[in-house]
Image (tube, helix red, strand yellow):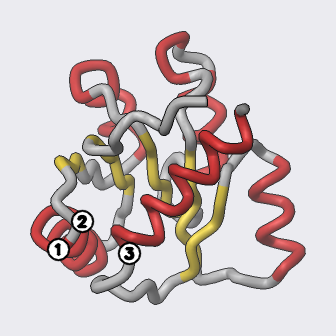
Amino acid sequence: MSNPPELSRLMYVEDEPDIRVVANIALTQVAGFTVATPNNGAEALKLISSFMPQLILLDVMMPGMDGPQLLERIRELSDFVETPIVFITAKAQSEEIQKLKSMGAVAVITKPFNPMTLGEEIRTIWRNYYESKR
């Protein structure tokens, strides 16, 4: 079977400005991705079809539309039914992680994440996602 396509375009939806800045630096300058960082679900839904992310990172706790609600809305868009979605959360208890995965997330990354290894962690999730599809 062929290798997964190279991951280059990510969207990270995060309402906390400080975390958005750190993640943007980690994912663009350290990991070399092209990244869109909308600060809420409504902004993400406006941007998603023009940006066409290959993988989407969602904060779980956001005002207005939270991560799980945003995941449901993204799955209603035909272009993004199969797009891998990863939750990023400070709530890292195993039952919470299982609940998020049961909603359709391919993985859960815990906060605080390590900015120096975040890109590699996401690439590993990407590879595992494609291997699970074989």
- Seen at 49% across and 38% down, the residue is 3
Mark pair 1, 2: CA separation: 6 Å
Residue 100 seen anywhere in this rendered image of the structure: yes
Callouts 3 and 1 close, C-beta under 8 Å: yes
Circle 1 sits on which residue? 30
Q: CA distance from mark 3 to mark 1?
A: 9 Å
Q: Mark 3 and mark 2 in contact (Cβ < 8 Å)?
A: yes
**Circle 3: is it few (<14), some (14-19), or many (20+) Cα within 10 Å?**
some
Q: Please, what secondary structure does the residue beneath circle 2 have?
A: helix
Q: Quadrant of the N terminus?
A: top right
Depth check: give the residue in front, 6 or 92.
Answer: 6
Direction left: furthest residue: 29
Left or right: where 44 falls relative to 59:
left
Can residue 17 be seen here? The reply is no
On screen, 112 above or below 44?
below
| Residue at the spot 84% in from the left edge and 50% down from the top edge | 102
Residue 5 on image: x %, y %? 40, 34
Residue visible at 46% across and 89% down? 112
Task: Provide the residue designation for mark 3.
Answer: 118
Q: What residue is shown with label 2?
A: 27
Secondary element at image label 3 = helix
Q: State the CA–CA distance, disc 2 to disc 3.
A: 7 Å
Above or below — where is 111 with respect to 76? below
Measured along the vertical axis of the image, is residue 29 above or below residue 85? Answer: below
Q: Where in the figure is residue 96, as x and y percent of width and height? A: 81, 71
- Disc 1 + disc 2, Cβ < 8 Å: yes
Image quadrant for the C terminus?
top right
Farthest residue to the top: give it.
78
